[in-house]
Image: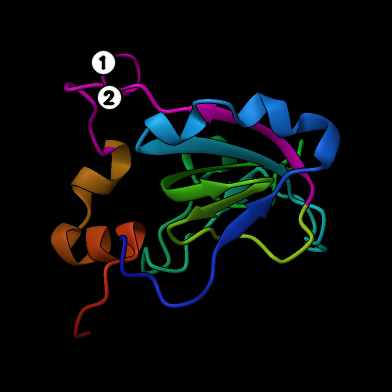
Amino acid sequence: MDEDEGDFRIIIDLPFVRGLYKLATFRYIYVIYFIDRIRQKLSMETSPPWAGGTKVGLFASRSPVRPNPIGLSVVRIKQVVDNEIETSGLDVFDGTPLLDIKPYVRDLDAKADANYGWIEEMAGREHLLLHIKGIPHDY
């Protein structure tokens, strides 16, 4: 995902710049943000757009429409310069309020026995995973 088109950067307010010390030694970070522009009505059931009409509970989805509109992305750090973190693709709007940044630590954050939950039961799972991962492909 390092070849994302566009300029993706996180700009840190000056009082927090010292908190970036040694962040660039990590390859990936968690970016936690407030989803402040969603206007859809909250529902406890959702149908992911890539899931062919399959309905699931909200908490079994990655829908941005949440009771507490907190977003989470894992992005690659390209570089840190002064108060800016240049990253791989970040799925937020310009000006989205940043809540926190945490380093992604390989042995703490990678779970070898993780699965795909209800997605494993779907026909065309491999194609769906391309959508989920944001990998360009032929439809």
Q: Residue furthest bottom?
A: 138
- From the viewer's perspective, tell me whether residue 26 is left or right of residue 80: left
Instruction: Give the percent coordinates (x, y) of residue 69.
Output: 74, 43
Q: Which residue is mark 2?
A: 110
Q: Judge whether residue 98 is colored magenta.
A: yes
Quadrant holding the C terminus:
bottom left
Label 2: state its secondary structure.
loop
Instruction: Give the percent coordinates (x, y) of residue 92.
Output: 64, 60
- Residue 123 appearing in the image: no
Q: Are marks 1 and 2 in contact (CB under 8 Å)?
A: yes
The boundaries of the magenta stretch are 97-116
Q: CA distance from mark 1 to mark 2?
A: 6 Å
Residue at 46 percent of width and 50 percent of height: 79
- Give residue 74's quadrant in the image: top left
Label 1: state its secondary structure.
helix
Residue at 43 percent of width and 66 percent of height: 53
Q: Which mark is residue 107?
A: 1
